[in-house]
Image (spheres, rainbow, N blue to C red):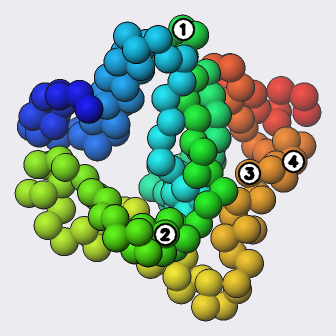
Amino acid sequence: MFETDIFNRVYNITNRPCYLCARMRRGYLYENAKKLGCNKIALGHHFDDVIETILMGILYAGQYQTMMPKLKSTSHPGMELIRPLYYVREKDIINWADSNELDFIKCACRFTENNLKDENNSKRMKVKRLLEKLREEDKTIDMNIFNSSKNVNIDTVIEYKQNGERYNFLDNF
């Protein structure tokens, strides 16, 4: 365990404090992992996080991207990020934790405590509720969302970005 003042540093940030906090925490993990001689950090994102993130990007950020199971750090050379629970369903993790009498913290951030007292108002919770409704109609909705990230037909995409460069369908029209 390492001590940090990240939660205090982002508390008064009004523009995307959760994004900034996550980036700072990841940076802190990378730095401390390096000091310990490690070349990877492992995060606990699971399958439901992946599909929720895809939908959140589409609905709230106007972008299509997914959360990768493994990637090389661009800001910490020689370091990688892995998500070993990538294909594990959230309910399975909760069931495992319950059967082992474990509790997980949601977020230790004062911003979340004070500004999202009703966590049902967070964008992630809204997407979770939307998915619950969609599952009532179609039990394959989660896999359809996930598989959409593996079935992208570039010929039908209006514009995309690759390696920092933008490409438009009109470039080859």
Tag of residue 127: none
Is residue 113 found left or right of 55 in the rendered image?
A: left
Q: Nearer the viewer, mark 3 or mark 2?
A: 2
Q: Residue at x 84, y 53 (%)?
A: 151
Residue 76: percent from left, percent from top = 48, 12
Q: Nearer the viewer, mark 4 or mark 1?
A: 1
User: Badge 2 is on which residue?
Assistant: 96
Q: Nearer the viewer, mark 1 or mark 3?
A: 1
Residue 156: percent from left, percent from top = 85, 48
SS at badge 2? helix
For residue 53, above or below residue 73 = below
User: Badge 1 is on which residue?
Assistant: 77
Q: Earlier in the sequence, mark 2 or mark 4?
A: 2
Separation (CA) of disc 1 from disc 3: 27 Å
Separation (CA) of disc 3 from disc 2: 28 Å
SS at badge 3? loop
User: Badge 4 is on which residue?
Assistant: 153
Separation (CA) of disc 1 from disc 2: 35 Å
Residues under numbered marks 3 and 2 in contact, where contact means CB atoms less than 8 Å apart: no
User: Badge 3 is on which residue?
Assistant: 149
Residue 27: percent from left, percent from top = 36, 22
Q: Nearer the viewer, mark 2 or mark 4?
A: 2
Amino acid tagged 1: Pro
Separation (CA) of disc 4 from disc 1: 32 Å
Is residue 15 found left or right of 153 in the rendered image?
A: left
Amino acid tagged 4: Asn
Q: Quadrant of the C terminus?
A: top right
Amino acid tagged 3: Ser
Mark 2, other Cα within 10 Å: few <14 / some 14–19 / many ≥20:
few
Residue 13, can we see it? no
